[in-house]
Amino acid sequence: MERQVKQFRATVRSRQEMTVIDLEGEIDGFADDSLNAAYSEAEAQAPSAILLNFSDVSYINSTGIALIVGLLARARKSHRRLLTCGLSDHYQEIFRITRLSDFMSIYPDEASALVGD
Amino acid sequence: MIVQVRNVWQRFKKQNERSALEGVAMAMEPAPAMAPSVEIAPNDPLLAYFQSAPGVVEIDRLLLDSPALRALKEAGVKLVVPLVSQGELIGLINLGPRLSEQEYSTDDRKLLDDLATQAAPAVRVAQLVREQEIEARQRERLEQELRVARLIQQTLLPKEVPNLAGWEVSAYYQPARAVGGDFYDFLYFEDGRVGLVVGDVTDKGVPAALVMATTRTLLRGAAERLVAPGEVLQRVNELLHVDIPPKMFVTCLYALLDPATGHLRYANAGHDVPYRRTANGVVELRATGMPLGLMPGMEYEEKEATLVPGESVLFYSDGLVEAHSPEYDMFGFPRLRELIAGHAGGAALVDYLLGQLADFTGVNWEQEDDVTLVTLQYTAATKEAAMSATLTDLNHERWRVLAEFDLPSEAGNERQAMAEVAAVVQELDLPARCMERLKTAVAEATMNAMEHGNKYQADIPVSIEILAGETAVAVRITDRGGGQPIPEAETPDLQAKLAGLQSPRGWGLFLIKNMVDEMRITSDDVHHTLELVLYHEEGDKDGEASEAV
């Protein structure tokens, strides 16, 4: 069966006092290693906040939600804020339903996330 | 002449009774305590002889092959006077030799004859009076026992039914005159869940009531420490079988309801199978298991169902289905099922069924067994009520199958399910938000089907069926994981997950439930089917558009 798997990619960059992780592709079980590696890389820069940029994410499934929960747990352990931007309406709703939005601020885009900080 | 009559009434109560006939001793000597008593077996020919003898019988002249006759001779009995009342032999007067050692004279015999004629009816009357006294005493004892049994039962049955938002629970219990062993119970847990118990102890009266009380206590204890209904019944069985009297057992159904979600988890120890009334007809909530107390080491199958608003479940005891009409027809399961299907459900169902039962049994019915009915109705808030009404209106024929396809159980194939469903429902022109919800629900349900149902065995397909109704779209996702209980998903709690108290995973079913308007799980021995229903939402189309793919 032919299936187009969009490779997941996570790239880390600094933006003012914040470290941004640009996420790209589909967040499911296959994204585990890259996502956690990117988070470690971001954490190494010791920023006060880490922004997860979902603008280029097309799909998040329940396993993907579990990975984000894992990142959130890591962030809370080191008293670091985790922010998000670029989530579609649908995934914003899922973040509300799962209550992830109670623990991570949701911004429409990167610019407002920087200001909001 | 000194006469002693003893042991008359009971030995002569019935001639064909198995107990032996003991002679009435009557002696001419002044030491009546010495008078021998002789047992006569019910099949001894001597009995028939005495029954038809015209009067005084001279023992030494009788020639019969009779053990009793030999015994009478050995005991020195010379004359026997049968006491016959209304053709029935009710006693004997036995006489030894005269003290003067002379033969009995004709006058003596005449006197004895007259005595027997006078005594027989008097002895009979005395027997009857005594019988009646004993019967009255027995009746009184039985009544007293019944009062105790009824008291035990009534004390232990719940005084009120659970008061749950969005639910209507009703209970009815009518003991038979002899008080059977029916019981029901409601258990309340801190997390809001409610346990429902319906059971029936074999036997009647005080023994049944005592076993019922024990079972109730054991159930409450087990349910406090264990969650899974199958484990609760297993535990009760282990404890009960040690103490229960032989040949007694308890049938019992235990269901755990989460009123917030309509999720019902249940196990059954040989009790009558509850009926669930759905929009598509009446279905049985079947789970197998042996009655409690029969033998140790039993395991109880556990099943689950998710009730949706508008649905109801009837729990009941065999007193209803095994009731007889004057023509001796049985009320029966098919009739009950038909009645439930034809009724709107809820507490009114109890009155309706009782009315039907009364019509069936007629006015002179003596209730044979306890009748217990417990109904559970998901009444729901207004929005949900409106939805379930729509679904009821959309009976099965009016759903239109848009497409059916199979997918191999390979990791990642949920994306294909999602894409195909999206393409198929394109023609329905669903609002964007609705479409996104449907896609997420389909993807999660397909993942569950591939992983938990088919264990990612590529050659076992997941079947997907897409249906359109007038105001809703439905998707059925079927795997081959039937015949085993679906493990209950813990409701995910983000705070507990962040604190490491819960696994970070476990979001699948939770997401599905939150994406769709209705979700139903059905299973048979081979398949599990998850049915998702989404209503088209009016006025949402030009509202929030979603860009997610």
Image (cartoon, coloured by chain):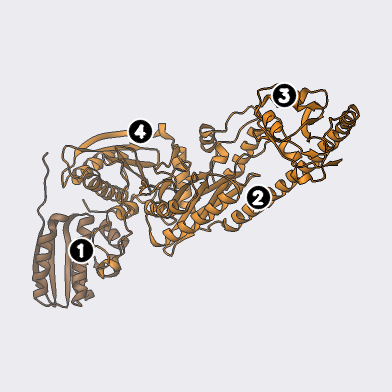
Chain colours: A brown, B orange
Q: Are marks 1 and 2 on the same chain?
A: no
Say what secondary structure mark 3 lies in: helix
- Disc 4 + disc 1, Cβ < 8 Å: no
- Seen from the viewer's position, the closer of residues B58 and A100 is B58
Q: Amino acid at mark 2?
A: Leu
Gap between marks 1 and 2, in whole Å? 65 Å
**Residue at 65% over, 23% down:** B65
Q: Name above or below for residue B268 compared with residue B166.
A: above
Discs 3 and 2 carry the same chain letter: yes
CA distance separating discs 1 and 3: 99 Å
Question: Of the residues tagged 3 and 2, which is closer to the observer?
Answer: 3
Q: Is residue B378 visible?
A: no
**Sequence order check: which comes first, mark 3 or mark 4?**
3
Residues at marks 3 and 2, CA–CA distance in whole angstroms: 42 Å
Q: Give the Cα separation between the discs numbered 4 and 1.
A: 39 Å
- On the image, numbered disc 4 is attached to which residue? B400
